[in-house]
Amino acid sequence: MCGIVGYIGKRQAFPIVLEGLKRLEYRGYDSAGIALYDGSDILLSKTKGKVSALEDKANNEMSLKGNLAIGHTRWATHGVPNDVNSHPHYSNSGDLVIIHNGIIENYASIKEELIKRGYTFQSDTDTEVLINLIEDVKKKEKVKLGKAVQIALNQVVGAYAIAVFDKNKPNEIVVAKLGSPLAIGVGEDEFFIASDASPFLEYTKKAIYLEDEEMAVVRLNKKIKIRKIKNDELAETYIQELKINLEQIVKGGYDHFMLKEIYEQPTAIKDTYRGRLLVKEGIIRMAGIDDHLEKFLNANRVIIVACGTSWHAGLVAEYIFENLARIPVEVEYASEFRYRNPVITSKDVVIAISQSGETADTLAAIKLAKQNGAFVFGVCNVVGSTIARETHAGAYTHAGPEIGVASTKAFTTQITVLTLIALKLAKESGAMSKSDFQYHLQELELIPGKVEKALESDKHILEVAKKYKDSKNCLYLGRGYNFPVALEGALKLKEISYIHAEGYPAAEMKHGPIALIDEQMPVFVIATKKGHYEKVVSNVQEIKARSGKIIGIVTQGDKDVKAIADHIIEVPETLECLTPLLTTIPLQLLSYHIAVLLNKNVDQPRNLAKSVTVE
Ligand code: F6R
């Protein structure tokens, strides 16, 4: 999983590619590189570390003038992150150069063959093998670069989004895609290539998204033709008019993307239900559900597949679907589901949840479910992403681009979409009365305002964060709808502050974790008024009796938990099934502040990347 950028046209290519890489660092940031054609040769600069390190290095070691360049920001799969393994990679002759996002699974056997034929390799990467295979085919078959790429790709197994150019033909870049995303920005006498549209948004809003197994020769002064890699057939060239703005993907005055995205949640939730939640009319309108209502209503069960934070949203949905719509739900880690030979039938509806729409395990789970005849519905944030395309139907979350690696607004907008679906099914199946349905619609419409209210506790949360920032371990407890919120709270803390944290159903605590509790252990307890309140208060007493530090996430005006807890953080009152949309907010802010206080890289935590396109 990496970010790729390319440019060919009338402008200076280096700054465009460099800036583009900075915007794609959410895809990986352990090394970066750029190959630039300066009018006679390829100049290459690459380094371990972030794009800023590449900027310094390139400034020192090469001329930055030229109208053709490709660049890469890496998240290592084959070979440790170092200068040599960084992309771009040359072919042995030095004529060809490549950037690659993905994995070539059969690279070892190809490499062996190439070594026998006299090829040598500098790096440990699968990508260097691919560029030499392309060169070998080009020489052997005496074909142009485009054809050589096509023949070579028919010999590889794996996933790729690639861009390749030949210094002897500096008017074209060859691109191809299978499994990793690739967009082509179409300007006036210029083209952009990127993993998503963010690197070229200020230059053009016209974009072509390659489908899997498609390739194109992007040539100056030529219309783009897209071909099938397998059989050379022409495919449809569909140029989309993009509607997202650059402002949506820059920090907008916040110190970090994560904070910006936390604060965007009232708007993101509103955008997610806009046009769907029609309170006056008393209906929920969702084309993806309306068109396939019978599938849902006749389903034996719903299986939710997802990873990470999206899996937590799936767990919240399990409570909502079963409680409101009385539909049996199973929630599965996509990575487990795909390999455990699950029983899937044509009477199952599978809901795949993914912010990026590119998560490899979720995608594989979808493919498996489809092969077994299930109807697959996607809940994605990234429009046109692979999962959005691979599913039979779906609903977008409309959260806008999420750049911070730690997922925040994706989680609450996923819950919003899933709540809309559950309510719609509850009404259509008769599981919920008309008046109850109407009440739920009204309450859901009020959530953005209540999220705003919850955000007002930010300063108080910072003070709480200061008290617990040096903890070595933390426990998060919740029950019912808020048990998954406890898991999500713990995940947020772990991933950005590197403090060990665990989420537990509050009542399970006495079956083991209670042994961990002493005066060093902060315990974040979600104890909202509705939903097993008295039981949770008893759990809080048990922690207190063992000298644990208690931070209660409570409903405004709470008295019982306040009387026992060391700190409380209040959220507005709402329906029990909607509480996760509010209780999540303080936990996100808490993790954010702790990570900032500890001087951690909030938006790009170590070892992580925004979309996990490897299994
Ligand atoms: C956590 C986080 C990850 C993702 C997971 C799935 O903050 O961001 O756990 O939720 O990698 O990603 P998507 O939703 O893109 O499939």
Image (tube, rainbow, N blue to C red):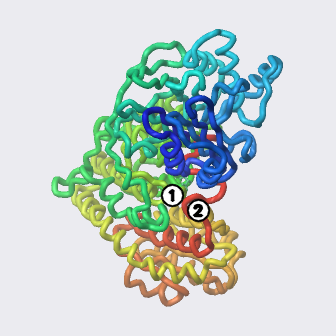
Q: Quadrant of the N terminus?
A: top right
Badge 2 element: helix
- How many residues crowd around disc 2 within 10 Å: few (fewer than 14), some, or many (20 or more)? many
Is 420 situated above or below 300? below
Q: Is disc 1 in contact with disc 2, using a CB cutoff of under 8 Å?
A: no
Q: Position of residue 17 (x, y in %)?
A: 51, 43
Comparing 308 with 246, the one in front is: 246
Q: Is residue 492 visible?
A: yes
Asked whether the viewer can see residue 340, the reply is no
Above or below residue 114? Residue 535 is below
Q: Is residue 306 above or below residue 212?
A: below
543, 493: nearer the viewer:
493
- Give the CA distance from mark 1 to mark 2: 14 Å
List the single residue furthest toward the bottom. Answer: 563
Q: Three-letter amino acid code at disc 2?
A: Leu
Q: Is residue 390 above or below residue 460?
A: above
Residue 89 figure quarter: top right
> Could you say where residue 488 lies in the image, as x and y percent from the top left?
54, 62
Q: Give, as a three-letter code, the residue at label 1.
A: Gly
- Asked whether, in this view, residue 615 is left or right of residue 322, the answer is right
Ligand 1 under 8 Å from disc 2 Cβ: yes
| Image side of residue 62 versus residue 275, left or right | right
- Relative side of 17 to 496, left or right: left
- Residue at the spot of label 2: 491
